[in-house]
Image (cartoon, grey):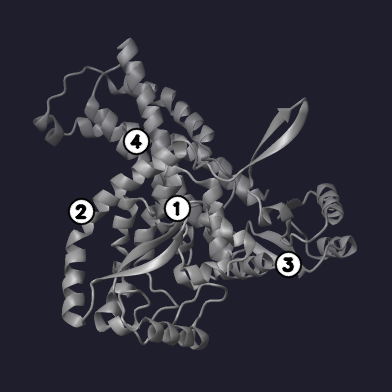
Amino acid sequence: MKKSELFFGMLLVPVDFTMIVAASVLAYWLRFTPSIIELKPVLFDFPFNDYLKVALAIAPLFVLIFAFEGLYSMKATRTFWREFFKIIFSVTVGITIIILIIFLQRKWFSSRFVILTAWLMAVALITLARFAINFLQKLLLIYRGIGVHRLVLIGSGSFCDTSTREFKDHPELGYKIITRENTIDIDSLRRIHKEKGIDEILVCDPDITMAELRQASDFCQRNRIEFKFIPAILQSISTNFDIKVLFDEPIIEIKNTTLDGWGKITKRAFDVIGSALGIIVTSPFMLAAAIAIKLDSRGPIIFKNERVGHEGNFNLLKFRYMKLEHCTSDQNPNLEEAIALENNLIDRSSVRKGPVYKIKNDPRKTRVGKIIEALSIDEIPQLFNVIKGDMSLVGPRPHQPREVEKYETWQRRTLSIKPGITGLAQISGRSDLSFTDEARLDIFYIEKWSLWLDIEVLFKTFFVLLKKRKNIS
């Protein structure tokens, strides 16, 4: 752990304490402003000095809740939105406890205005203070190198290639790659550590043997270096597991996803409610798009494209953005010619590697089609797929049967849950990602699903839609 990370991590505690007290004081002060008193007279008698003592007494309670919620991470790479939602949750829990105490012992004052205002102020002040601290920490990290973790990457697989690129393109992640080695060589690591210093070693090649991993682990433990590795089992088996006992012997039970039982029921209820609201909100856009498509070119407004779901094939609904004669569906009387043209374009113009293609500067689009695809309006009818049960709001994107036929074995795991309108891959690069990276993100989602993760993905999707994709004309 870097000294700067320890300093900023410890700094968060007194800052949170101060912001909680400040929020309490501001709420009390606002309650006694003439404009508020005019609207609603003060009905309680609680001197400010007594109020301040209470505020100072309860502030440690909030700090304790923050600690339980994991808000005192030492890392400089804390995610703002994840931290923001944790702050809201933690402050709400603290306020709820205070309300219960007031209700049970009735020795304190009772003012809904002060309580609600204190809640809003606490969320706002703590968020702003933490944003400022994190911003300063990242400035020092990027421009002064304070707190940077010196990283050695070991391996030659695709994950190592991705890691190398991501760490170099995003210095705010807090890592500087000292060197990249193809294999584990303890003598070489010892020399690098002596000359440059090593904070972390990441072995990202699943083909490296357990004997070599043990050597590297021993070296790291002796030299106080953080050691991380990608075990080979992750290529084909879930990382969710429980350790149980069977006939007095420990066994490991591998789980595919938390989307079983109540998780499945919760997600389905969320999908139905969310898609119904989505249809209501987007109905003006769908009406405008339908009229524009009809006026611009002949053919159906909705394009039905066969995709592979978790329980077989289904027709994915999209607003048609291609000329009818180029659509690869049964709606096109010249289907064979359309497929031949698409295959030719894939060979010449696809900018994605792997089984899934993406044609740049696609000449088959209509004038309206270029606009609605660029704005992702063409995807909105998939809300009806969600209502029907073929899809979910969040999940792996569904692909065509001819694309799925080219999947590697481990990539087929993405078919184990309902496909989604958006997903982790869509908020992490959309069609600019390679399919290998997309599949890895989808598998991570399958293993780590939670309702909060769905909400976070949907929230971030709105901001991603505002960005222009590289691989689209």
- Look at mark 1 in the image and give the residue it sits on: 418
Element type at mark 4: helix
Label 3 CA crowd tier, 10 Å (few <14, some 14–19, many 20+): some
Q: Could you say which is closer to the camera, residue 176 or residue 14?
A: 176
Nearer the observer, disc 4 or disc 1? 1
Q: Nearer the viewer, mark 2 or mark 4?
A: 2
Mark 2 in CB contact with mark 3 (< 8 angstroms):
no
Q: Which residue is drawn at 42% across and 49% down?
A: 454
**In terms of image quadrants, where is residue 293?**
bottom left
Q: Which of marks 3 and 4 is nearer the N terminus?
A: 4
Labels 3 & 4 near each other (Cβ < 8 A): no
Q: In this view, does 159 lie above or below 135?
A: below
Where is residue 285? Give x, y as percent. Answer: 20, 65
First in sequence: mark 1 vs mark 3: 3
Q: Mark 4 points at which residue?
A: 23
Instruction: Give the answer, above or below, for where 78 lies relative to 167.
Output: above
Q: In which quarter of the image is residue 86?
A: top left
Gap in angstroms between the C-alphas marked 2 and 3? 53 Å
Give the label on residue 178, or none: 3
Label 2 vs 3, first from the N-terminus: 3
Q: Mark 2 points at which residue?
A: 280
Spatial separation of the CA atoms under disc 4 and disc 1: 44 Å
Farthest residue, direction right: 187
